[in-house]
Amino acid sequence: MPLDADVVLMGEVHDNPVHHVNQAIWLDRMKPAAVVFEQLPPHLAQVAESLRGSAADVLGAALEWEGRGWPDFEMYHPVFIAAGDAAIFGAEVAGAEIESVFAGGLAASRDLTAIFGLDAPLSAEIRAKRLDEIAQAHCNFMPEDSLAAMLDVQRLRDAALAEAVIAAWEETGGPVAVVTGNGHARDDWGVPSLLQAVRPDLSVIALGQLSSPPSSDVPFDDWVVAPYLDADTRGDPCDALR
């Protein structure tokens, strides 16, 4: 996989352990100066730095990992180990801010809206595609009137990640790796597009990881298909909601 850039986004499906093995391999090869984690709030990034190399149960508990809704930390532990001595940055948005944006739109966010132009309307085509992606990610069970609010939250998270990347670059001089979901890593409307708008001087590579072969074009600079280890027996996770 190409890793020679100022910023490398390493996408994932959150609960696919194979994806985290790949991220650990890429981090070991890249040896970034900083790693930005979508899954960490900024204050817990400092905890991660102070507990470098700790056992999975110790680090996971200190990071309040599963209590904050993320999958089994055992999957992510190799990623933190592979980060080595890199500076750790967190980009998780606080719950209170998410609630404010969900209820009041992006105007309710902090200055990210102004910095990254989130108040600029999306084209009808892009908006429709993004709403459809959110609907599918929630098994098409989310009420239609909630989809637009979820899109605002997704854009806020994109901006928070981009902000953390810029901070990491300015503090360390890069390169910067980003551990995040595929939706944020994609180069058409995710974090790369925001970085291009605000910091066009930074070279960016977007890597995607899929759990099954794609049926259409894939919005990444490079990507791999890495199925679940139990793909033959896992079934459809949406079945539990039906």
Image (cartoon, rainbow, N blue to C red):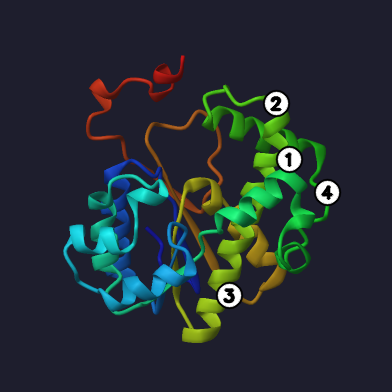
Identify the mark nearer the N-term, 1 or 2.
1
Residue at 47%, 58% (x, y): give it: 38
**Gap in angstroms between the C-alphas marked 1 and 2:** 17 Å
How far apart in space, not on screen, are marks 4 and 3 (Cα)? 24 Å
Give x and y (percent) for residue 241: 45, 19
- Left or right relative to 68: residue 59: left
Vertical comparison of 187 with 31: above or below: above
Numbered mark located on residue 144 in the image: 2
First in residue order: circle 1 vs circle 4: 4
The amino acid on which the numbered mark 2 sits, given as a three-letter code, is Glu
Decide if residue 188 is in sight here. no
Residue with the mark numbered 3: 166
Q: Give residue 31's position: percent from left, percent from top.
A: 32, 74
Give residue 214's position: percent from left, percent from top: 47, 32
Q: What residue type is labelled 4?
A: Pro
C-alpha separation, residue under disc 2 versus residue under disc 3 = 34 Å
Find residue 126 and name its label: 1
- Disc 1 marks which amino acid? Ile
- Residues at discs 2 and 3 in contact (Cβ within 8 Å): no
Between residues 165 and 61, which one lies in front from this camera angle?
61
The image quarter containing residue 107 is bottom right
Q: Are marks 1 and 2 in contact (CB under 8 Å)?
A: no
Kindly indicate whether the residue at mark 3 contacts the one at mark 1 (C-beta within 8 angstroms): no
CA–CA distance in space, label 1 to label 4: 10 Å
Asked if residue 85 shows in the view, the reply is yes
In percent of the image, x 20 and y 63: which residue is there?
58
Circle 2 or circle 3, nearest the eye: 2
SS of the residue under disc 2 = helix
